[in-house]
Amino acid sequence: MLRANIVREVQALPIQEQFEMLECLARSLRQQCQARAASDTSSGSLTAAAEALRSDYQNDAELTAFTALDGEDFHAAR
């Protein structure tokens, strides 16, 4: 259905039903925006945090001291 047809159909409704339609659309849009923001925030905040700490890990030897053991075999104590 074309947008113009939808608008005409909604305008033909009584004013109370138009308001109910508007509330329904607003609720749906709000939910979609919140879902999109949540997904953007979760991946975006992790990326931003990693970028913020990148120079620390590249320049601070205390944060990367244990990487010297990366080539070592690991055996759990029994």
Image (spheres, rainbow, N blue to C red):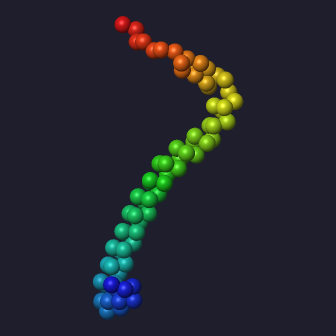
Identify whether 19 is placed above or below 12: above
Identify whether 21 is placed above or below 74: below
- In the rendered image, residue 22, in percent from the top left (x then y), is placed at 37, 78
Q: Residue furthest right?
A: 59
Q: Residue at x 47, y 14 (%)?
A: 73
Q: Nearer the viewer, residue 52 or 71?
A: 71
- In the rendered image, residue 20, in percent from the top left (x then y), is placed at 32, 78
**The image quarter in which residue 15 lies:** bottom left
Identify whether 68 is placed above or below 25: above
Position of the C terminus by quadrant: top left
For residue 50, side relative to residue 32 (left or right): right
Position of the N terminus by quadrant: bottom left
Q: Residue at x 33, y 79 (%)?
A: 21
- In the rendered image, residue 37, in percent from the top left (x then y), is placed at 47, 57
Count of marks placed on residues: 0
State whether residue 15 appears in this view. no
For residue 76, side relative to residue 70 (left or right): left
Q: Nearer the viewer, residue 62 or 33?
A: 62
Identify whether 20 is placed above or below 78: below
State whether residue 31 appears in this view. yes
Q: Residue at x 64, y 22 (%)?
A: 62
